[in-house]
Image (spheres, rainbow, N blue to C red):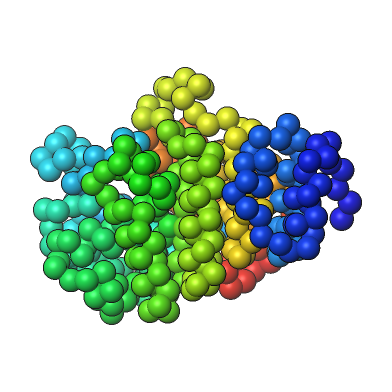
Amino acid sequence: MSILLMDQELKKIQDKVVNGERLTIEDGLKLYETEDFLGVAQLANMVNERKNGKNVYFIENMYINPTNVCEASCAFCGFKRKPGEEGAYTMHEEELLKYVEDRWNDNIREFHIVGGHNHQVPFDYYLDTIRTLKKHYPQCTVKAYTGAEIEFFSRISGLSMKEVLQELVKAGLDTLPGGGAEILTERYRAKMSPEKASTDEWLEAHELAHELGLKTHATMLYGSIETKEERLIHMDRLRQLQDKTNGFMVFIPLAMQPRSVNANLTRRTSAYDDLRTIAISRLMLDNFDHIKAYWINIGPQLTQMALSFGSSDIHGTLIEERISHAAGALTSQGLTRKELIHLIKGADKKPVERDTFYNVIKEY
């Protein structure tokens, strides 16, 4: 694959990439600073095609947010409610099953469950949510509860994080989503999500999950107060844990959504930042198989562009996504399988329907 670099200072990084050498945080900063935007894209595309060829993966999945009541006060969240506040809700078994039944189709393979840190209900509530779904939809993978939620469950239950995970697995948990990571530096977390799990606690939750045999996901929420160096430190911390456990399946950069749908454009990440961050993620995270372009945050058309910037996954149908939309996402709340396939083919890539663990269901 021939690459035309306009910035000759990228040549050293190209040599590292071609030879499979790990990039440093300094290399990452150079990739953020260079004006050779398409040079960065070409390098990322080269790495992605080396790992995945032309394949781009998607899944038919359903989002479920069982409760929006939350003890935390994260600066970026528009989803949470305090107990008793207008709009606060907590689904119990009948409501949960009705929610799923109303949105169900037989192609759905995964329930993606995240919600508030609701301290008004016991840990058993969270176990029962999984048990209920597994009982009525045993064919579906349950992807539930972030690393931050695992730490929260440990506090409300008196169990260790390992014991929490063991109980969740017994209830039917199959994998952890990647949320709750935000930016894995304590400066950021002290300002943006002070009541939630620390950097070390989030990483520990996923390391424990990996030790128990679970494959998990990892995210990064960028576009607020973090520096470019903090984004790269975040990637490096994930990379180090992946060296140790090989338990992460995919990395998902999430563009920060302003708290109002009507927020002006200067409050949103730029298309250039979104695409560059996806490309840099692909180049930095050499031990991750997949980088996901999350269409809910950046929109379907930019997601299509991201498939030439190192992304090999566009997530899924979702049915009804609430958390990003509560924070001001401008996208639709779901896409059909047909729309996802059209999006991938339009980028001259090969659509591959997958299950949660990247086993191929069907190639299009």
Q: Residue at x 33, y 38 (%)?
A: 192
Q: Quadrant of residue 360?
A: bottom right
Whether residue 57 is visible here, answered yes or no, is no
Q: Does residue 325 appear to the left or right of 55 in the view shown?
A: left
Rendered-image quadrant of the N terminus: bottom right
Give whichever of 45, 349 is nearer the camera: 45
Number of dots carrying numbers: 0
The image shows residue 197, relative to residue 246, as above or below, that is: above
Q: Nearer the viewer, residue 279 or 354?
A: 279
The answer to whether residue 195 is seen in the rendering is yes
Residue 143 position in % (x across, y down): 39, 64
Quadrant of residue 56 in the image? bottom right
Place of residue 164 in the rendered image (x, y in percent of width and height, measured from the top left): 24, 71
Vertical placement of 79 versus 285: above or below?
A: above
Asked whether, in this view, residue 290 is left or right of residue 67, the answer is right
Q: Quadrant of the C terminus?
A: bottom right
* Left or right: residue 37 compared with residue 158: right
Q: Which residue is at 17% across, 61% downward?
A: 155
Residue 15, position as x, y percentages in the image: 80, 55
Give the residue drawn at x 54%, y 61%. 239
Residue 268 screen position, x and y as percent? 49, 28
